Amino acid sequence: MDRVNVPAIKLTGLKKRYGTGDAAVDALKGVDMTIWPGEVVGLVGPSGSGKSTLLKCLGAVIEPSAGRMELAGDVIYDDGWKIPDLRALRRDRIGFVFQAPYLIPFLDVTDNVALLPMLAGQDNASARKRALELLTALDVQHRADAQVSQLSGGEQQRVAIARSLANHAPIILADEPTAPLDSERALTVVRILNDLAHEYRTAIIVVTHDEKIIPTFKRIYHIRDGKTHEEAGEGRVI
Amino acid sequence: MINLASRDVLHGWGKFLFTGIGLGLLIGATLTMAGVFRGMVDDGQVLIDNSGADLWVVQQGTLGPYAEPSSLRDDVWRGIAGIAGVAETGNAAYLTIQMAHNGKDTRVMIVGIEVDRPNRPGAPPYLIAGRPILQGHYEAIADERAGLKLGERVKIRRHDYTVVGLTRRMVSSSGDPMIFVPLKDAQEIQFLKDNDALVNERARTAANPVFNRPGVPGLLEAAQASATQARSVNTVLVRLTPGADPATVANEIQRWKRLTAYTKAQMEDILIAKLIATSAKQIGMFLVILAIVTAAIVAFIIYTMTLAKVREIAVLKLIGAKNRIIAGMILQQALALGVIGFLVGRIAAGLWGPAFPKYVLLLPQDAIGGFAIVLTICGLASSVAIRAALAIDPAEAIGG
């Protein structure tokens, strides 16, 4: 399959129901979504709208109830998981950036980033080399040997972004990555994500409430009551 | 691959080390209990070995001389010495007393031995200072744990004794240090009545018309003299000729002399299997309880350490770490805790063991066995934390 013209993410009628019977809650009621490689897309919605559920389904952390999910042309869910090793899928093809960086506190900066390729089977030297490349790209190479606790919030978030890219994942799921940051640092993070998407052809979904960064997206998916609708964003250049 | 366990330990090494030290003190107490048991067994063993005997001849039907009272006339050795296979005999008397020394009471075992020639069965096989007993009365050889010094005079019952020799690891089965004295003195200490009792006894004998008969001169004096003579011993220790079968000689003694004779193996059974059996069970129970407590504490520590890392474990699972990596991290930490705990415990037991009033014997094989048990306990205890870690949902790393 020609991967260039294949969506990085394609969701068709994706549903998620929690519970059964009268207690059942439909968190996702048939989500359709297409995201292309190199795109940074915003996912916006009020609390309880289903943003986190959608992110967890995309991250193969929870199983959808119905629908179809494709990653880079591979069907990974079609009314049931189609890939046996979901952990390997997450490790090799999906990068995660969280609201808080959630770095491993007992590893230094380099090893936090190098851990992912090591988990994928790379030797320590090449994994650390890859980590240093990413830290340099994100301009935190000078903190490579530092402990996580010695970093500022912005630096920690950059390291977390570097970690998400460490295995050349074609998709990054970012869950409110700018929430703990001030305006300047928040916009810096968004700029970094845009640069990375452009450079590595990575598709990035950014879940956010942050009014400061919403205008930077070219496409935005609004989610409300488990359903999404798409609209064009301002695509403001930072 | 990075060793996550060691990185985590190094990151919080102070907390980990202090936890290990705390666990180590508990393990030290457990090892000490095992050492106390071994010490008891060893006390019994050295009592047998140091007596230099192959057979113990005691009063018929008793488990003497250590486990039960036994009384023999001090001339029965003559008959025993004539039995084929017997090389040498030695009368011995044993008595445990409280001895006042330097203003405090010391519990010692008085051992009466024949001193007419050296190396009689029953005599201490070696001295660390001084000389053997050469006088028939009022000389003593003391185990160093009795706290006596060479040349010191010590009062035992009615008489003062001069310490002429010191020996080591000569203790009773209870761990009390031995003081060797001439047999006649020991018989007096053990069997002779005090002066008031003797006066009273003489008066009673004199008032008895059977002993104080007119026309039988010397009868009362003979009866009185007999009352003040101590002619009993607790055992006759027998050394066999080379090649003699102990069981055969013991059977001969029992058959012809109406006495009971125990071989070394039988005496070990009496001392170790019977005499200290209850204490051994007591210590065994305590060891089992300590092992359970150790397991519970290790499990609790590892479980708490794991729960403190819920978010990190969720992240690890989210980014694709396999279960075996997470389980390995927890298991390695539990084992590391066990290693630190064992080392601290072994050192602690070695330091405080000699301060115990009774002999604490820490055997290398017990240490090796204890190490294996500690690691097994830590491994099993970590399973609780591993179960908890594997149940952590990677979704916990994602908000909402």
Image (cartoon, coloured by chain):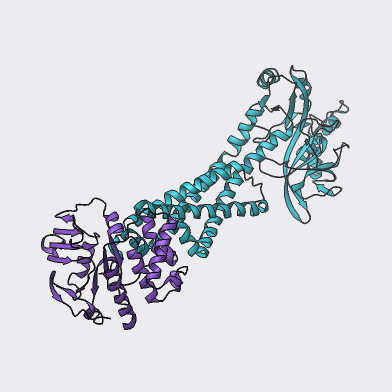
Callout count: 0
The x and y percentages for residue B360 are: 64, 47
Residue A162 in view (yes/no): yes
Residue A65 in view (yes/no): no
The x and y percentages for residue B133 are: 85, 38
Horizontal side of B41 relative to A37 (left or right) equals right
- Quadrant occupied by the C terminus of chain B: bottom left
Who's the residue at 39% across and 56% down the image? A118
The x and y percentages for residue B113 are: 79, 34
Specify the colour of chain B: cyan
In front: B74, or B352?
B352
Q: Is residue B77 positioned above or below B138 on the image?
A: above
In front: B200, or B262?
B262
Shown in purple, the chain is A
Residue A230: image quadrant is bottom left
- Quadrant occupied by the N terminus of chain B: bottom left
In front: B133, or B17?
B17
Who's the residue at 86% across and 39% down the image? B137
Q: Is residue B231 positioned above or below A32 on the image?
A: above
Q: Is residue B93 positioned above or below A132 on the image?
A: above
The x and y percentages for residue B327 are: 39, 53
Horizontal side of B77 relative to A180 (left or right) equals right
Residue A180: image quadrant is bottom left
In front: B330, or B376?
B330
Q: Is residue A119 positioned above or below A151 on the image?
A: above
